[in-house]
Image: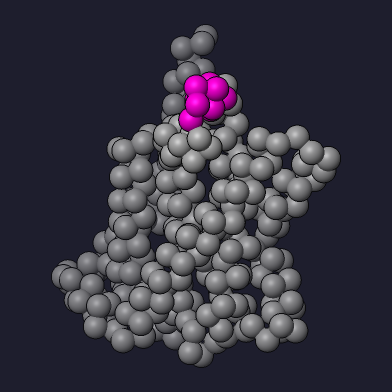
Amino acid sequence: MIGKLTLRLKILVFFLYIFLLAPILVVLPLSFSNDTFMVFPPESWGVRWYVAMFEHEGLTRAFRLSLWLAAVVTVLSLLLGVPAAFAISRFQFRGRDLLLNTFTAPLLLPSIVLGLAILLVFVQARLLGSYSGLILAHLVVTTPYVIRIMVTAFGTMPPSVEEAATMLGASPFTVFRRITMPLMMPGLIASAALSFLMSFDEVIISLFVTGPQVRTLPVEIFDYVESRTDPMAAAISVALIVATLAIILILERTLGFSKAMGK
């Protein structure tokens, strides 16, 4: 009986994977089409649209902006989120749970609601269409993830190890450098990777705050798909999927998902 249930569960999981991967199975062959319009299956094959992707001035400019933006947002998210997570996980004070819930509240809101709220605030602050506004909008999304991951990472670190180092005469800086930093490094790398990917891939909130001169890659792709029907969008999608998988595989090979998430 248990064996039959296990077999049925495996079959169900297999079909769920097929359902989730079905769009990729369509996009992948489309990206290698040489046709002028999207036709499935492609009538001719090649890498025409991969070459065109790198030659498109708007896309390359938006790619450089998204890369720079994701790097800046990742650094700022860590600078804001790690100290907040350390204070929440290591100190007992009134309102600690309320503070954690407030910091992580954006995780519970739909992106469209969060984007509209940011739009209403940024209109008054005159931050729309600016680099600073785009950075702040992405920080609202990425910092809660950093706090959540690092709270878990700090929660799995035994305080007794740091206390023992302090009792043996180590200075606070030495304790942090030799004990705390190595133990928190997996969670720190996981937070950085997630922040970078989320900032680079964010489209809904970016649509609310970008302007004619400040356009990220997801926004540029969104506008391109609205006006064009060629397979370049498929080529860009495959390239982004491969890049994302590469980052995830590197994280898994070096740390492992369980260790990286602080479990």
Residue 184 shows up from this direction: no
The boundaries of the magenta stretch are 161-170
| Residue 263 higher or lower than 209, as above or below | above
| Residue 183 higher or lower than 129, as above or below | above
Q: Quadrant of residue 150?
A: top right
Is 98 displayed left or right of 172 in the figure?
right
**Residue that sits furthest to the top in the current view:** 1
What residue lies at 59% left-to-right and 52% top-to-bottom? 81
Q: Position of residue 254 (x, y in %)?
A: 31, 38
Total marks shown come to: 0
What residue lies at 59% left-to-right and 56% top-to-bottom? 80
Q: Position of residue 204 (x, y in %)?
A: 58, 70
Is 4 displayed left or right of 132 in the figure?
left
Is 155 displayed left or right of 28 in the figure?
right
**Residue that sits furthest to the bottom in the current view:** 212
In-front residue for pair 89/130: 89
Dominant SS type (magenta): helix
What residue lies at 30% left-to-right and 37% top-to-bottom? 253
Q: Position of residue 138 (x, y in %)?
A: 57, 66
What residue lies at 80% left-to-right and 45% top-to-bottom? 98
In-front residue for pair 40/2: 2
Q: Position of residue 222 (x, y in %)?
A: 47, 76
| Residue 27 higher or lower than 100, as above or below | below
Q: Can residue 165 be found in the magenta stretch?
A: yes
